[in-house]
Amino acid sequence: MSTPLIKVENLSKRFTRKLDLAERIVGRLRGSAEPRTVRALDDVSLEIGAGEIVGLVGESGCGKSTLGRILAGIMDQSDGQVLWEGHSLATMPPRDLKAARLAAQMIFQDPMSSLNPRKTVAQAIGEAPVAHGMTRRADVAGLVESLMAKVGLDPSYARRFPHQFSGGQRQRIGIARALAVNPRFLICDESVSALDVSIQAQVLNLFLQLKQDFGLTYLFISHDLGVVKHIADRVVIMYLGRIVESAPAEAFFATPNHPYTRALLAEMPNIRQRRRVFQPVKGEIPSPLDPPPGCHFHPRCPQAFDRCRIERPALKTIAPGHTSACHLNDAPHTTGADNHQQGRISP
């Protein structure tokens, strides 16, 4: 098998907040004054092959954006490692590390807040390639014009400021800015969620066209399975900092395995099921400050049994290219044998 373009192994990210004076006093009175720690990512492993579009899906707060920021080099991990074409970023020579960082670029959810309101479009797009010595200053105007045309913007607008554009146009500016440093890997963090539905379709089609034109690889972060279904080759589901299922898109939507995945898919809009009772996933997502033991999903899972409450399920292969972290995929047990058929959870 070919080496994946990017790979993460046993990646964890913890955010620790020091206690203020009042919290320390209360903590000492209660006999506990430990800093509060959020486990945003908990032992995540993932591979993304060159030219692949991976859709990363989960509820807000599950760690999707944290993973994306680590892959983009914006944030450092607490544990684990990130490998670029089989080489660990932690041990790369500075020159190779710089090249790997430039090759991975991020496109953010809110284009207005990710663009400097004091800089024109030409400055926003052309600044990075000049700063990194990839383009001469004399040639930057031509580069900006070319990239604006490539993403569907009129090059004559290059001297305008971000507030003079619509939301969809600003997102195209963000895409052009990312393309300016010749990336190979784009991390799209909810890049269409703030746009109108009609504009979403245009931007998604633009991403697909740019993939063909530039040979790009994508990590497409979203909470919208409908959007992911349109663009992704493979779908990865996260829950409370852990990956619970991963499968090729066709198999994922046809034969979902994990109870959480099945609950998410059940609430996708479907024209063939016009009359149905809305049944959201029961309960609230647990706090990452105090995640439940065992399977993180067990407090909300209708098929949970004793083992789920004490033992973390491993991510296991259940079909070619299809992995799932659920104890129901193991040998039949006394409380859920009726839900287990040939290593899969029955729909």
Image (cartoon, rainbow, N blue to C red):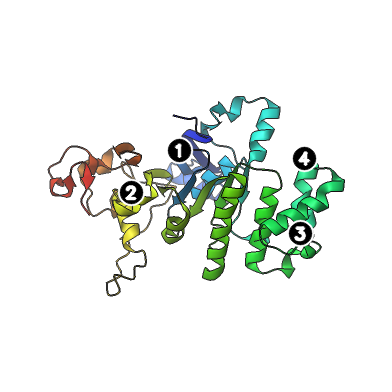
Q: Are marks 4 and 3 in contact (CB under 8 Å)?
A: no
Q: Position of residue 27 (x, y in %)?
A: 48, 45
Kind of residue indicated by mark 2: Ala
The residue closer to the viewer here, 156 or 236, is 156
Please name the residue that numbered disc 2 is placed on: 251
> Residue sitting at 42 percent across and 56 percent down?
229
Please name the residue that numbered disc 4 is placed on: 134
Q: Which numbered disc, 3 or 2, marks the residue closer to the eye?
A: 2
Please name the residue that numbered disc 3 is placed on: 121
Q: Position of residue 263 (x, y in %)?
A: 31, 58
Q: Are marks 1 and 3 in contact (CB under 8 Å)?
A: no
Q: Which numbered disc, 1 or 4, marks the residue closer to the eye?
A: 4
First in sequence, mark 4 or 3: give its number: 3
Please name the residue that numbered disc 1 is placed on: 46
First in sequence, mark 2 or 1: give its number: 1
Left or right: 37 in relation to 281: right
Q: CA distance from mark 4 to mark 3?
A: 18 Å
Q: CA distance from mark 1 to mark 3?
A: 35 Å
Q: Position of residue 5 (x, y in %)?
A: 53, 35
Kind of residue indicated by mark 1: Leu
The image's mark for residue 321 is: none
Judged from this view, the residue extending furthest toward the front is: 213
Kind of residue indicated by mark 3: Val
